[in-house]
């Protein structure tokens, strides 16, 4: 991959359009976010590694459904999104050291008073196509005999719209992504997240499989930014301060699990490694 980048003089970053605050479009339709900032640090590390100061950055939009194929087939060199590193995905792609840790929850209208999984029995819910959350919710539905109808939407913004317009009573996703969607909703106070969490998962930057040289460059950059403390201003920028396009603040404190992952970087896909 490094040779291909050197020969072409360009690197392609996979970006999302509504994964707030990791990778989304600002008021100028430019990709911004926590993961995008980390990927731009990767670009700097690749420039230094290849002695290529004029490396051109290309942004390639990806979705939950196509992000893995586009990394696997080489269309995109690195995905800067909100992707969980798990054992299944490692059959097709590789991952950097962990960049964030999430818990699966659901969001619903506050007026409906839906706080637990049991409250969703027999109801219609939504998940985003191509996410590991969809498989998890199907499993929870069967295991608990809930009889939920599970709809799929093309991206997180559309999934949230299903709840907003009452086509579904709840949308299951990673807690921070739900938090971001609520914060940017027309009336944030109308929504509430579930009181239960249904998993703990590590996010990482997604990379081509079988390319240890590129992974080494990416992980070395992450370890440098973690160990130097440079990660904390980046975290605060996206999770504790007003963010574009509307200047909303997510107020999402750094979790003890993520602080540990910064202090002792790991690329483990195992949820138990973060408990």
Image: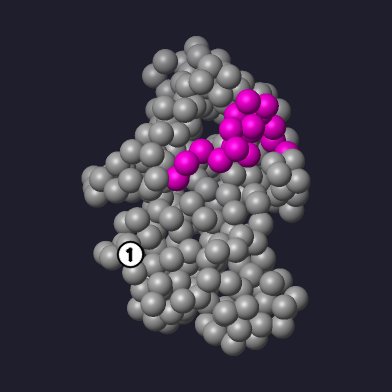
Q: Which residue range is magenta in the image?
A: 252-268
Q: Indicate whether residue 33 is drawn in magenta.
A: no
Q: Nearer the viewer, residue 151 or 117?
A: 117
Location of residue 13 in the rendering, given as x and y in whole percent from the top left corner:
47, 38
Quarter in which the C terminus is drawn: top right
**Residue at x-position 55% and y-position 84%:** 123
In the rendered view, tell whether residue 141 sits above or below residue 195: below
Crowdedness of circle 1 by 10 Å Cα count: few (<14), some, many (20+)? few
* Residue 174 shows in this picture: yes
Identify residue for label 1: 189
Location of residue 156 in the rendering, given as x and y in whole percent from the top left corner:
45, 62
In the rendered view, tell whether residue 261 sits above or below residue 105: above
Q: Indicate whether residue 263 is drawn in magenta.
A: yes
Q: How is the image coloured?
A: one colour
**Residue at x-position 27% and y-position 64%:** 186
Task: Using the rendered view, name the quadrant where residue 121 is placed.
Answer: bottom right
In the rendered view, tell whether residue 154 sits above or below residue 55: below
Quarter in which the N terminus is drawn: top right
**Residue at x-position 66% and y-position 24%:** 216
Question: How many discs appear?
Answer: 1
* Residue 208 shows in this picture: no
Taking the image as shown, residue 247 lies to the left or right of residue 179, namely left
Location of residue 219 in the rendering, given as x and y in whole percent from the top left corner:
62, 26
Location of residue 180 in the rendering, given as x and y in whole percent from the top left corner:
40, 53
Secondary structure of the residue carrying tag 1 is: helix
Q: Nearer the viewer, residue 45 or 6?
A: 45
**Residue at x-position 39% and y-position 63%:** 157
In the rendered view, tell whether residue 39 sits above or below residue 250: above
């Amino acid at each position: 991959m490094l040779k291909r980048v050197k020969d072409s003089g360009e690197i392609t970053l996979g970006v999302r359009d509504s994964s707030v605050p990791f990778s989304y479009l600002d008021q100028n339709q430019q990709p911004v976010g926590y993961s995008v900032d980390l990927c731009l640090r990767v670009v700097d590390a690749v420039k230094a590694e290849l002695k290529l100061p004029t490396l051109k950055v290309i942004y390639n939009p990806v979705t939950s459904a196509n992000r893995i194929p586009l990394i696997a087939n080489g269309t995109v060199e690195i995905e800067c999104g909100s992707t969980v590193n798990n054992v299944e995905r490692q059959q097709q792609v590789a991952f950097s050291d962990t960049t964030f840790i999430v818990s699966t929850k659901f969001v619903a209208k506050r007026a409906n008073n839906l706080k637990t999984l049991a409250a969703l029995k027999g109801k219609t819910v939504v998940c985003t196509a191509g996410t590991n959350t969809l498989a998890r919710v199907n499993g929870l539905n069967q295991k608990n005999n809930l009889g939920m109808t599970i709809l799929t939407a093309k991206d997180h913004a559309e999934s949230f719209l299903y709840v907003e317009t009452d086509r579904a009573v709840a949308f299951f996703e990673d807690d921070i992504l739900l938090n971001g969607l609520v914060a940017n909703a027309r009336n944030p106070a109308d929504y509430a997240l579930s009181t239960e969490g249904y998993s703990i998962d590590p996010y990482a930057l997604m990379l081509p499989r079988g390319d240890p040289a590129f992974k080494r460059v990416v992980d070395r950059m992450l370890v440098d930014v973690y160990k130097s403390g440079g990660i904390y201003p980046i975290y605060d920028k996206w999770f504790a301060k007003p963010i574009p396009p509307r200047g909303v603040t997510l107020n999402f404190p750094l979790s003890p699990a993520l602080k540990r992952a910064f202090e002792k970087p790991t690329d483990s896909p195992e949820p138990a490694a973060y408990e």
